[in-house]
Image (spheres, rainbow, N blue to C red):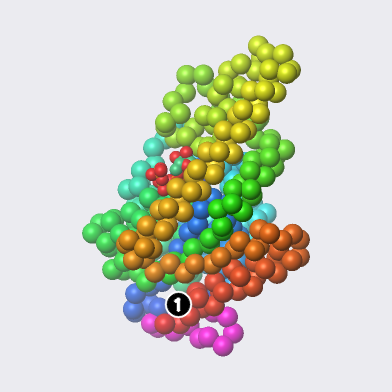
Amino acid sequence: MQPSLIVPPSGLKPNLFNLRHQKEKVVIVMGATGTGKSRLSIDLATRFSAEIINSDKMQVYEGLDVVTNKITNEEQRGVPHHLLGILKKPNADFTVTDFCDKASITVESILSHNRLPIIVGGSNSYIEHLIDDYNYKLFRSKYDCCFLWVDVSMPVLNSFVSDRVDAMLLNGMVDEVRNIFDPNANYSKGIRRAIGVPEFDKYLRNEQFLDEKSRAGLLQEAIKQMKENTSKLACRQLGKIQRLRNIKGWNLHRLDATEVFRKRGKEADLAWENLVAGPSTEIVGQFLCN
Ligand code: ATP
């Protein structure tokens, strides 16, 4: 069961009167793909009684849960998630304005239940538009925003996302992509833009006509492309976050999670708590009390 009030860590008292009469508060978790945004959002949501609004432009679609790396029900640990898997039609558009409209309504609804909205996802164009452009900066005028940026050094992240693609393969990624494969599909629309879909086009077109060796060759080629494109995405996302911080002056709290990725098992969990979850809890606790 979740407590119904926003509860900061011990020693800090939230001023709920101020919460309702000054600007209301929203937390935004940013970071490149694979850095641990979802994990952090769940850690915070269970500590502060929050609900999560997805801002990953591929995860708004239903399906391709493995390929898009959607958080599982088990990982959600009962925390309500919004704008996750809501689009049933694979070709549906979901523009930045659609995102802003839906995210704004959801933020209001979460706040009206006296809970903390946490916006989480890698689509920086959605977040930038919502915060800085939507309806003449309405969002900033209405809400205080606390930005958390989970950062991981690029070589370490590249190696992690490469391993993650291998894990996706074991989790049924190829079947998932085959299920939505359509030889006439447009890869610039809807969910088929997701990394892992266009990369498998050649393989899925030809697999039934090829011998085992040629099939394995095409599969390896698709996997290689998927890894490269995921690394490129991570690099682009990092560049966009740095621009928001350095050029646009967003006050991003950077949490360096690199050491977490260098460790395994309990040591990794401890590093996560010490370097990411713990400091983030402090930051959000202070933010809610101001
Ligand atoms: P852009 O303007 O480049 O689209 P953005 O900030 O709006 O950037 P990103 O989240 O960086 O959006 O997504 C860019 C592209 O990366 C998507 O169109 C898709 O091809 C791929 N992508 C993003 N998120 C995922 C995901 N979860 N799974 C698979 N592919 C993804």
What secondary structure characterizes most of the magenta part?
loop
Which quarter of the rendering shows the N terminus? bottom right
> Residue 153 colored magenta?
no
Q: 80 left or right of 138?
A: right
Closest to the observer, 165 or 17: 165
Q: Which residues are magenta?
A: 8-18
Quadrant where the C terminus lies?
A: bottom left
Residue ID at (62%, 33%): 223
Q: Residue at x 55, y 30 (%)?
A: 199
Is 196 or 275 nearer to us in this picture? 275
Residue indicated by mark 1 = 287
Please tell me whether mark 1 sits on a helix, a strand or a loop: helix
User: At which x and y percent is residue 87?
Assistant: 47, 40
Q: Is residue 83 visible?
A: no
Residue 245 vertical position relative to residue 236 in the rendered view, above or below: below
Q: Vertically, is 252 above or below 226? A: below
Instruction: Name the residue located 35 percent from the left edge and 47 percent from the top edge.
Output: 96
Residue 14 on image: x %, y %: 48, 83
Q: Is residue 123 left or right of residue 174?
A: left
